[in-house]
Image (spheres, rainbow, N blue to C red):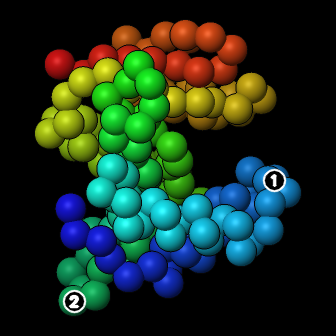
Amino acid sequence: MKKREMPKLARMYLAYKHELGTTDSDKAHLEDLDFFAYSKDVDVVEIFERTGTRKPNCIGFFIVLKGLMQGYDYFIQETYIEPAYRRLGIMSKELRNYFETHKGKYGLYIMPNNIKAKLFWTSTAEGLHNVRDDYYSFEVE
């Protein structure tokens, strides 16, 4: 997968981290994103608004670690879509497209109080089950 330039993605990543209420510095978050963007074992998938314009507008992203988390083929590290595009089925569709070409065992972590994320993943990932604490798993065949 070709790695893209990150300015818009970096801004969205910082917005996502601030929305979560993380306390790390912006510099630390951007270093994480830099690692994700250039690692061959990580897919950074940008989501673009479907418009007729020449220059598509990036509206979200998800980050998948490939073979880096013990017990999983894939670990969904982060998912984010701009607030104006939430609850439209866009993220679910993009993730399902990814699952079509990346079969295997998936893992993810859902923050304990994030009810919206639990509802989203329950409807998006067939067979989602709690493995321990707030770690979840599902299989794509």
Q: Which mark is residue 21?
A: 1
Q: Is residue 61 visible?
A: no
Q: Is residue 96 above or below residue 121?
A: below
**Quadrant the C terminus occupies:** top left
Per the model, the C-alpha gap separating discs 1 and 2 is 35 Å
Q: Which residue is mark 2?
A: 54
Q: Position of residue 44 (x, y in %)?
A: 38, 59
Badge 1 or badge 2: first in the primary sequence: 1
Q: Position of residue 128 (x, y in %)?
A: 44, 15
* Secondary structure at numbered mark 1: loop
Crowd rating for badge 2 (residues with CA inside 10 Å; few <14, some 14–19, many 20+): few
Q: Which mark is residue 40?
A: none
Q: Position of residue 10 (x, y in %)?
A: 55, 75
Taking the spot 81% from the left edge, 53% from the top edge, the residue there is 21
In the image, taking residue 31 as reference, residue 113 lies left or right, namely: right
Q: Is residue 24 above or below residue 106?
A: below
